[in-house]
Amino acid sequence: DIQMTQSPSSLSAFVGDRVTITCRASESISNYLSWYQQKPGEAPKLLIYSASSLQSGVPSRFSGSGSGTVFTLAISNLHPEDSATYFCQQSYNTRSFGQGTKVEIK
Amino acid sequence: KQLVQSGPEVQGPGASVRVSCRASGFTIDYSAVHWVRQARGQRLEWIGWIVVGSGYTKFAQKFQDRFIFSVDRSAGTAYMELNNLRSDDTAVYYCAAERGDSTGMDVWGQGTTVIVSS
């Protein structure tokens, strides 16, 4: 199974900041990488697929990059409603998720 | 577009549970339906998927023995059955549709809480 590891596990930032989350795969997954946002008590929401494609309806302050084994989710101009846990997920070989990164607003 | 899941379940160890996932506002005919679970405070765990058009199923290695997936295309509903329940199966179970080829799980159900307790 492909293991997905995210860093950091949590971060705290101010409204308006730019934050980045890193996801590493245990082997190359090309660009088969998605990012999800999950708020407490809610189902995950797809933000990014194919490493850098923005899902319809998702604000353009979210962006994804990377290929192979290292990927990044960036949130520019952080909004209060971006407070959530973010997960990466590979679809190169079956599916597996990272452990999540909790983003808090200072 | 949404997936509507059945309500919460409380079962004893060794029992079985069946969770339904009904599509509303779109057809699941051309989708893969994934099942994902999340214990309280834990990461999302991919259980497996069913390709609706063919009925093909695939499970994560640790879930290969006790889960069964099925689909009723006429009802637009997918089902997950979990047998021989254990306490560590207590979790929220989600269904999610992937409507393209590795394009991400873009429609999710609201989640079904399954509690295993004696």
Image (cartoon, coloured by chain):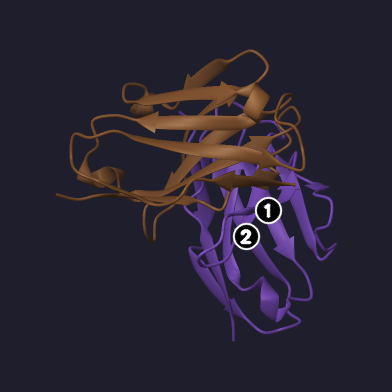
At 74% from the left edge and 27% from the top edge, which residue is drawn? B101
Labels 2 and 1 touching (C-beta < 8 A): yes
Q: How many marks?
A: 2
At 40% from the left edge and 52% from the top edge, which residue is drawn? B8
Q: Amino acid at mark 1?
A: Thr
Question: In this structure image, what is the colour of chain B?
Answer: brown
Pointer 2 chain? A
Q: Are marks 2 and 1 on the same chain?
A: yes
Q: Does any portion of residue A68 appear in the rendered image?
A: no
Where does label 2 land, which residue?
Answer: A21
* Res. B13 image quadrant: top left
Q: Which mark is residue A35?
A: none
Q: Regarding mark 2 in the picture, which secondary structure is present there?
A: strand
Q: Regarding mark 1 in the picture, which secondary structure is present there?
A: strand
State left or right for residue B6 relative to residue B85: right
Question: In this structure image, what is the colour of chain A?
Answer: purple
Number of residues whose C-alpha sits closer than 10 Å to that of mark 1, classed few (under 14), some (14–19) or many (20 or more):
many
Q: Percent position (x, y) of residue B10?
A: 29, 50
At 59% from the left edge and 42% from the top edge, which residue is drawn? A89
The correct choice, above or below, for A73 with respect to B37 in the image is below
> B13 or A99, which lies in front?
B13
State left or right for residue B12 relative to residue A29: left
> A15 or A44, which lies in front?
A44
Q: Percent position (x, y) of residue B87?
A: 21, 46
Pointer 1 chain? A
Number of residues whose C-alpha sits closer than 10 Å to that of mark 2, classed few (under 14), some (14–19) or many (20 or more):
many
**Residue at the farthest front position:** B75
Where does label 1 land, which residue?
Answer: A72
> B89 or B103, which lies in front?
B89
